[in-house]
Amino acid sequence: MDDIMSLSGELKYLAIFSAVLILPHILLKLKIPSGISALLLGISFVIIDPAIKTDQLFVFLSQLGITSLFVFSGLEVDFKEFAEHKNYFLKYLTKTVLLLAIITVALYDFLNLDPQASFLLALGIFTPSAGFIINSLHSYKIGTDMEYWVKSKAISKEVIAIIFMFFAMQSGDLKKMVISTCFFIILFLILPKVFKIFFKYISPLTPNLEVPFLVSLSLIAGVLSKAMGAYYLVGAFAVGLIGASFKKDIFKEDEEVVFKSLSSFFTVFLPFYFFMAGTKLSFSGFDKEAITLGLLFVLIFVPIRMMATNTSLRIMLSHVKTHPYSISLSLMPTLIFGLVIAGVLKERSLAQEYIVYGLIFYTLITSLLPTVVFATQKVMKIEDKIEDKIEEASEHV
């Protein structure tokens, strides 16, 4: 331990960079999401060197990771597709809001939290992490049609959750809410002009600058929104939403290439967000009380969330009614939004520690669910095929 503590700054950075960038990808082969691996690395490394949690280099890398992910999520919003299925999405979002209200009241009564903390906790429990889900869809192997509905439902929920989160975080201070609201109104007015100037005067002179431009702009907006009392993801998502209306300029004829470039960028830096989130936690926080609460959340809210999605799909979209569970299961991961809400509750002392860790435990379980279930189904299908072949062979004998 003393030898590790005496490592020079360069060797320390090398050890952390290697671990965060490589180990999660190795563990991904074991069906462990890279975000969870990076989170556990953060909890482990901070035991060795507590100064890591305030290291500005890792703070900056985590900001790059979370903002680039949410600008990607914002760009995934397709306003035309939402308009085509507006009746379905309006009904679905109305039901989501009603469920959030009911759960907020239940948490308020059961956990004795104030209304602000109860509502934020409800958001952390019910909001799927669109960016994380979209980035993981290829591993679920659920089919193109179902992938579309998973993306659409995750993004629509995330949009409404980000709006609610913004107002919930400002609800204790009317003056701050007014200032922050004015800031975002100005941001939404300025950003289209910034995009127009960039694509008219800068982009033609410097090709392939779209991704660096989006990343830089989302980072600036994210840092400013954090300073306004919101969170990095709010500003970054706003940049993505505005950018979605400039898709023709951003992607030109290479939409897939640009998306892959942006995806590759946040794939490199996002683990540092989870790593830094882990440095603010400790293994001792996952005590009996926290784990019990987390399991209670899983047992209550996972069935409710799946039932809510399944019923809306069966009633409103007949062409996907045969396998709605695949969509609802794919929407379970709450890793990013859960950690964000847990961080807010912890930073602002809005909830007791066991509640924060209970939410994180629930978040870890829900984020593992699709991978575990789909992997198990795949193994069962292989076993069934083997049994069928054995039966066929025995018949020939």
Image: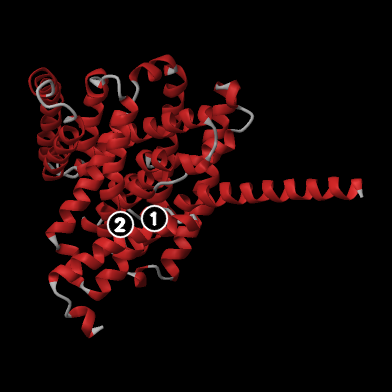
Gap in Å between the C-alphas at discs 2 and 1? 7 Å
Amino acid found under the numbered disc labelled 2: Leu
Which image quadrant for residue 55?
A: bottom left
Residue drawn at 33 percent across, 54 percent down: 113
Crowd rating for badge 1 (residues with CA inside 10 Å; few <14, some 14–19, many 20+): some
Outermost residue, bottom direction?
2
Residue drawn at 45 percent across, 60 percent down: 293
Q: Is residue 156 above or below residue 66?
A: above
- Measured from the top left, where is residue 238 in percent x and y? 22, 31
Which image quadrant for residue 12?
A: bottom left
Relative side of 14 to 283, left or right: left
Outermost residue, front direction?
397
- Asked which secondary structure carries label 1, the reply is helix
Amino acid found under the numbered disc labelled 1: His
Label 2 belongs to which residue?
A: 21
Q: Is residue 374 above or below residue 24?
A: above
- Location of the N terminus by quadrant is bottom left
Foreground residue among 30 and 313 = 30
Residue drawn at 13 percent across, 29 percent down: 187
Dots 2 and 1: beta carbons under 8 Å?
yes
Q: Is residue 101 above or below residue 286?
A: above
Foreground residue among 319 and 385 = 385
Q: How many marks?
A: 2
Q: Which mark is residue 125?
A: none
Foreground residue among 180 and 106 = 180
- Measured from the top left, where is residue 101 in percent x and y? 40, 38
- Measured from the top left, where is residue 235 in percent x and y? 19, 36
- Asked which secondary structure carries label 2, the reply is helix
Residue 50, can we see it?
yes
Crowd rating for badge 2 (residues with CA inside 10 Å; few <14, some 14–19, many 20+): some
Which image quadrant for residue 37?
A: bottom left
Label 1 belongs to which residue?
A: 25
